[in-house]
Amino acid sequence: VYANGVAADAAELVSPSALRQPFVIGRVSGGTASGKTTVCDMIIQQLHDHRVVLVNQDSFYRGLTAEESAHAQDYNFDHPDAFDTEQLLECMGQLKRAQPVNVPIYDFKNHRRSSESFRKVNASDVIILEGILVFHDQRVRNLMDMKIFVDTDADIRLARRIRRDTVERGRDVSSVLEQYGRFVKPAFDDFVLPSKKYADVIIPRGGDNHVAIDLIVQHIRTKLGQHDLCKIYPHVYVVQTTFQI
Ligand code: CTP
């Protein structure tokens, strides 16, 4: 019952998850192949009793034209302009308002987005936004309740990248090394590393750091609990006032 004597909808009082805003972890900017995905997967596993979604900044790569694709070796995929940040902001805004969104599907082999299919992402308690440059744009940073930087040794990242790009992304070793020296490493120094200052938490050794991941999960659980309370308390408070009057 509200102060004016109107009965509140029972569901409004007992269903905090329907009312609360999702907790956004802006997350896990690190260098290429730093183990961001591993860290996110571990956080998701530990939060199995909550609705958690992972949104990858890679999904918002601009698709290349046929002409650009023919010269893909000259294209800088590590520059902030390679991403459609406006679309990313739109999707994240919708998810924050607890609305479902269609996230594009990006193909690293052809440097294109799928024209037919999308991944439908539903409203959730926790949204993890992962990518190499998620701290670059201030508007994207402002969406985040917590920012994590995965700090992994450059040699380990390069070794992982060679393995990953040759096995999963249809590249050969010499093209990976050429791209690394020409674009990936300079962009890391110019854009990724300077964005580390925005992180709330820096995780050394990526997915091997179980203590850091446990602490992060504990913090998210605390925050989700507080979200519940601050949404329920106004109703509880009003009910009490009515009785006191
Ligand atoms: N990239 C590419 N070709 C494209 C698009 C992107 O080679 N058509 C590369 C960019 O050079 C960029 C990298 O993909 O450096 C971004 O993906 P990365 O962060 O390496 O992948 P993740 O899976 O997020 O890495 P991890 O989870 O291991 O940190």
Image: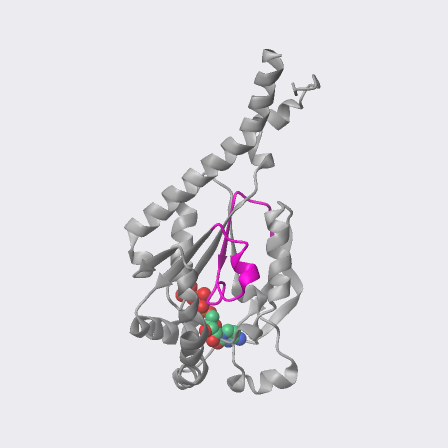
> From where the camera sits, is residue 103 visible?
no
> From where the camera sits, is residue 138 visible?
yes
Q: Looking at the rendering, which quadrant does residue 48 occupy?
A: top left
Residue ranking furthest to the front: 245
Q: Is residue 48 above or below residue 26?
A: above
Left or right of 40, for residue 142: right
Depth check: 64 or 90 in front? 90
Residue at 40% of width from left, 49% of height from top?
Answer: 43
- Residues in magenta? 119-145
Residue at 37% of width from left, 73% of height from top?
Answer: 163
Question: How many dots with numbers?
Answer: 0
Left or right of 192, for residue 102: right
Depth check: 21 or 233 in front? 233
Q: How is the image coloured?
A: one colour
Q: Looking at the rendering, which quadrant does residue 38 occupy?
A: bottom left
Residue at 61% of width from left, 59% of height from top?
Answer: 89
Q: Looking at the rendering, which quadrant does residue 185 occupy?
A: bottom left
Quarter of the figure with the N terminus = top right
Residue 222 image point, x, y percent: 41, 38
Left or right of 244, for residue 197: left
Q: Is residue 139 above or below residue 97?
A: below
Depth check: 138 or 69 in front? 138
Quarter of the figure with the C terminus = top right
Q: Is residue 219 above or below residue 38?
A: above
Residue 18 image point, x, y percent: 60, 35
Residue 141 image point, x, y percent: 51, 59
Q: Is residue 216 magenta?
A: no
Residue 83 image point, x, y percent: 57, 70
Q: Is residue 124 magenta?
A: yes
Left or right of 237, for residue 27: left
Q: Is residue 53 above or below residue 56?
A: above
Depth check: 99 or 169 in front? 99
